[in-house]
Image (cartoon, helix red, strand yellow):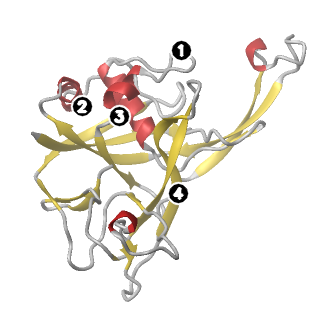
Amino acid sequence: MNKLISIDLFADFGMLKKPDTNEPVYLTFNMLHKPALLGILGAIIGLEGFREKGKLPEYYEKLKDLKIGIQPLRHENGNFQKSTVKYNNATGLANKDADNKNGATLNVIEQFLIAPAFRCFLLLDTDNELHEKIDKNLKNNYAEYLPYLGKNEFSMWWEKYKIYEFDSFDPDGTFTIKTIYIKDEPLKDSKDTGALLNYDPVFDDKLEGYSFSYFERLPIEYQDLGANNFQYKYQKFAFTDWGLKLKHKGSNHLLNIKNYGIIQVF
């Protein structure tokens, strides 16, 4: 049996490092993404993180099938305020030269989020022991390990545990989505066959009164590139107050929450 809950996660600061940025400037994702949220939930129920090179962490292996939804809070048109900090990394491990000897001090400029907050929806399986533990710990405000948003010094808290009544959503007209949602680009120059249908919501360009549209390419899972080399797999996401519609009905994972609105879980 499925159970839909939400909590509001928040932190004073956050740094969700983009792996494709190089020293001396490290950039952060703006939005909380699924692998990061699974790590937070893993810490709350006491699952292990990254411990061995070339091996996925315990929290990811055991929670990767959990369906989640993410709604940014206290944002400005989908964006959070950001700043940068400059610091020196003088540890030997960070500064090996070509001869594997300690080199000069590494100067780092790091971007970070200011006061990020997210409403996180979790579609739990009540027959799953780990899902039950997530539900219990979140409800009781208990964590095995202190969760943090990207870095140890950026502690994260949660509040407002809620349970929802919901149904699957299969719209005929225009609707809005409260959460971020998967927004693939339409396939061009392709035949309109079942294998090529575009199921994601598209903007209803006949409407007026919208105010913002936010887009970001975010990690959605880990993929094995061979030789135990795991890297993020990305998906295009959108967040908007636009009215939306579906060109084709299909598996879009939209849920209609009673007295709340439409969300997408993925």
Farthest top residue in view: 101
Question: How many C-alpha atoms fall within 10 Å of the one at disc 4: few (<14), some, or many (≥20)?
Answer: some
Residue annotated with mark 4? 216
Residue annotated with mark 2? 138
**Alpha carbons under labels 1 and 2: distance apart:** 28 Å
Give, as a three-letter code, the residue at label 1.
Glu
Q: Earlier in the sequence, mark 2 or mark 4?
A: 2
Give, as a three-letter code, the residue at label 4.
Glu
Q: Residue at x 57, y 30 (%)?
A: 226
Q: Earlier in the sequence, mark 4 or mark 3?
A: 3
Q: Earlier in the sequence, mark 3 or mark 1?
A: 1
Give, as a three-letter code, the residue at label 3.
Lys
Q: Foreground mark, 4 or 3?
A: 3
Q: Quadrant of residue 34?
A: top left
**Alpha carbons under labels 2 and 4: distance apart:** 28 Å
**Alpha carbons under labels 4 and 3: distance apart:** 21 Å
Q: Secondary structure at mark 1?
A: loop
Q: Foreground mark, 2 or 4?
A: 4
Residue annotated with mark 3? 64
Above-or-below relation of 38 to 244: above
In the image shown, does 61 or 147 lie closer to the viewer? 61
Q: Secondary structure at mark 4?
A: strand
Where residue 48 appears, x then y in whole percent?
A: 40, 17
Q: Secondary structure at mark 2?
A: helix
Give, as a three-letter code, the residue at label 2.
Leu
Q: Which mark is residue 52?
A: 1
**Alpha carbons under labels 3 and 2: distance apart:** 18 Å
Left or right, residue 21 beside residue 199: right
Q: Secondary structure at mark 3?
A: loop
Question: How many C-alpha atoms fall within 10 Å of the one at disc 2: few (<14), some, or many (≥20)?
Answer: many
Question: How many C-alpha atoms fall within 10 Å of the one at disc 1: few (<14), some, or many (≥20)?
Answer: few
